[in-house]
Amino acid sequence: MSYFDAKTFYENFGVDTDKALDILKNVSVSLHCWQGDDVRGFDTDPSKPLTGGIQTTGNYPGRARTPEELMADIDEVLKLVPGKIKMNLHASYAIFDENNPWVDRDKLEPKHFKKWVEFCKERELGCDFNPTFFSHPKCDPLTLSSPNEETRKFWIEHGKACIRISQYLAEELGQPCVMNIWTGDGFKDIPADRIGPRVRYREAIDEILSEPYDIKLVKPTIESKVFGIGVEAYTVGSAEFALAYAAMNMDKCIPLMDNGHYHPTEVVSDKIPALLAFFPEIALHITRPIRWDSDHVVLFDDETKEICREIVRCGGLEGKVNIALDYFDASINRISAWVTGVRNLQKSLLFALLQPNGRLKQLQDASDFTQLMVVQEELKSAPFYDVWQEYLKRENKPFEYYSEIKRYEEEVLSVR
Ligand code: RNT
Ligand code: ZN
């Protein structure tokens, strides 16, 4: 089928494919820098294991080991993905050199991210940011919820430094910076005191957010989690904790949902409209959990499509939903992991934009559940692929991308 035929097909359902493509190309998707180097960063010993309940598995060759390598890899990704990309950095990706020697995380400054700003400016990208509360000797193992005054203070100072860096990124790049607060704080086994760490965590976030920032430029988000590896029994920043914090501090921050952070039968697609009934703005980490928060590459699968359908149906593309990717696979080519995930998210957004949402809502409101099922099922085999191809064509991106990734692997990654 040609794009013209596909367009006519969708028109019969009242869907304008050109309009969908125009919307899609302006949807900002935050690209997580940490897929390129297995969440190692540049500020700690890369031979030390990750902590905080997250893990990368696999040792596919070619991991980026320096800022230069990571930036080159991101450029390769940008060549192959359509749409509007925003960078997403962690504080652990600070760049140190002769003029700016290593400092610990509580002493980080905007200047340590100057090279990233230059990188983003040259490519006209915005940038999101994350304090890094894991994989560091000062995790005792707790960070912001630690009973140890000195530990907690260190991490609060880190959080405040990150607010200043986020404000700098937003001002320099002319786009708001979403700054996500996530800690892996928790316990391997049944704790004796569950409320103590949570009260300390609440107070620590209060202190971080007392650092001055312009809420139009810096958007702090609070990410919850159910459990992590080695932290199976108790997570300080649980779903109720994070949501309650965001709800009580709506003028200061936004809730963030990662779809790997819930019990396996819970779905974030259903939580999006629940939150948007109260919050003017929310944030998402889109990932693929297999049985747990395994952070597999995002696929064009049912839940990703459903998440995107809710984003579209709830008006999320009009500034209500901040979309970021969050996964890390070290067992396959990392560029391919990145590109495949971004493209699948874009595909899912396109799929959602090609639904006759107004008509489907009418059928639901008229209790015509028979026709609702029939129409939705028919649309699953609509000529979606032709519209996707047209999108790539308009965006000047290759349809087949594996051969380019293979070339880059042979010429660049395999000689690292
Ligand atoms: C971990 C959280 C968190 C991290 C990144 C690296 O479970 O999802 O968002 O993946 O900050
Ligand atoms: Zn996440």
Image (cartoon, grey):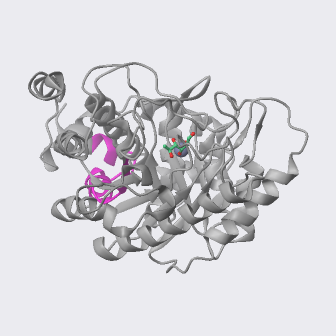
User: Does the rendering let one see residue 281?
Assistant: yes
Indicate the quadrant where residue 234 lies: top right
The residue that appears at 68% across and 58% down in the rendered structure is 150
Pick the front one: 370 or 296: 296
The answer to whether 393 is drawn above or below residue 406 in the figure is: below
The answer to whether 250 is drawn above or below residue 74 in the figure is: below
Indicate the quadrant where residue 75 lies: top left
Instruction: Locate residue 395, reporting x and y percent.
Output: 16, 49
User: In this image, 31 relative to 220: left or right?
Assistant: left
The residue that appears at 16% across and 33% down in the rendered structure is 399
The residue that appears at 79% across and 51% down in the rendered structure is 197
The magenta stretch spans residue 21: yes
User: In this image, 394 relative to 239: left or right?
Assistant: left
Which residues, given as a range, are shown in magenta? 8-31
For the C terminus, the image quarter is: top left
Instruction: Locate residue 391, reporting x and y percent.
Output: 21, 45
The residue that appears at 27% across and 35% down in the rendered structure is 64
The magenta stretch spans residue 367: no
Pick the front one: 220 or 325: 220
For the N terminus, the image quarter is: top left
User: In this image, 203 relative to 395: left or right?
Assistant: right
